[in-house]
Image (spheres, grey):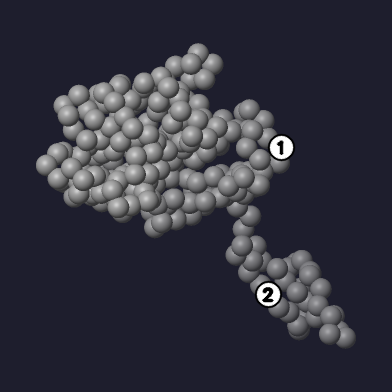
Amino acid sequence: MTQVLKYVGKGQWVSVDERDVEPGDKLIITENKAQKKSSSDKVDDFFSEIKNDVAKNGYKSIKVSTILKSFGIKKRNENNTEKIKSEFSKNGLYALPEYSKELKLTQTVRLYSYRVRQLGDLFETERDLENYVDENLLYKNLNIKEVIRQHSPKGTKDRLDFKGNSIDDEVVVLELKNAGGGKSAVEQVLRYAGLLKMEYPTQKIRQILVTGIQNYETALAINGMSDYQRDLFEWYLYKYHKDINQFEFVQVADEEINFSNS
């Protein structure tokens, strides 16, 4: 858009119509290149920026209020919530926690290109999860015949959630994480396995990590293991439905771990 400023004296300039310009007038003509973007363009820019950050860092942290502002939404309802979730899906993005109308405006969600998922309810605490698995003998569903809780390997102060023996007489590290695991949880299992290998040098050490959420950070840590380490390591999600008291372990498939974050 072109804007014409005409000098009218005493240091003052006023905007005039080009048709009112006369020969000899002192003028400044500017070209306004900043055109107002459509709401669709703004949403496209929003996702372009997010996907660049995800490609660079693995995820993008963003407040709910920022998401709404980027979509031009002033009041939340079911329709625009579904619209946002649909746009996430269309752009190959997954939100953790899952995007919903119940999230507070100040809450931060992480957006990933990796499939993050939660299969059911989470327990209140990690101890509650451990108690539930122990009291209901659920470790047997992982082919573990018996366990010792809070086992401390010789010469250390470390404590395993469960040290078990499998039906094939393998020694088992069973570590439970109520929500996501991440790099620290994977390293924890590997450290415990190393300590038990010193205690049981002739036995195979089976390594099991159970989490409530399948997330990028855990997959990335497992993806970085050697082939030998991967052969001994198992990752499961727990699927818990509190209202019907139903629980199961669901193994995370290799194809959901073998990925490139480039």
* Residue 107 visible, this angle: yes
- In the image, taking residue 186 as reference, residue 52 lies left or right, namely right
Residue 237, position in %: x, y? Answer: 37, 31
Provide the residue designation for mark 2.
29
Residue 135 picture quarter: top left
Residue drawn at point x = 11 percent, y = 42 percent: 202
The image shows residue 87 at horizontal and vertical percentages of 50, 37
Q: Amino acid at mark 2?
A: Ile
The percent coordinates of residue 174 (x first, y second) are 32, 35
Residue at 59% of width from left, 33% of height from top? 100
**Foreground mark, 2 or 1?**
1
Indicate the quadrant containing the N terminus: top left, top right, bottom left or bottom right. Answer: bottom right
Instruction: Identify the secondary structure beneath mark 2.
Output: strand
- Image quadrant where residue 5 sits: bottom right
Where is residue 139 shown, x and y percent of the image? 33, 25
In this rendering, is residue 39 above or below 83? below
Answer left or right for 25 relative to 235.
Answer: right
Is mark 2 in CB contact (under 8 Å) with mark 1? no
Q: Quadrant of the C terminus?
A: bottom left
Say what secondary structure mark 1 lies in.
loop
Mark 1 Cα shell of 10 Å, populated few (<14), some (14-19), many (≥20):
few
Q: Which mark is residue 75?
A: 1
**Vertical placement of 216 versus 98: above or below?**
below
Residue at left 66%, top 47%? 106
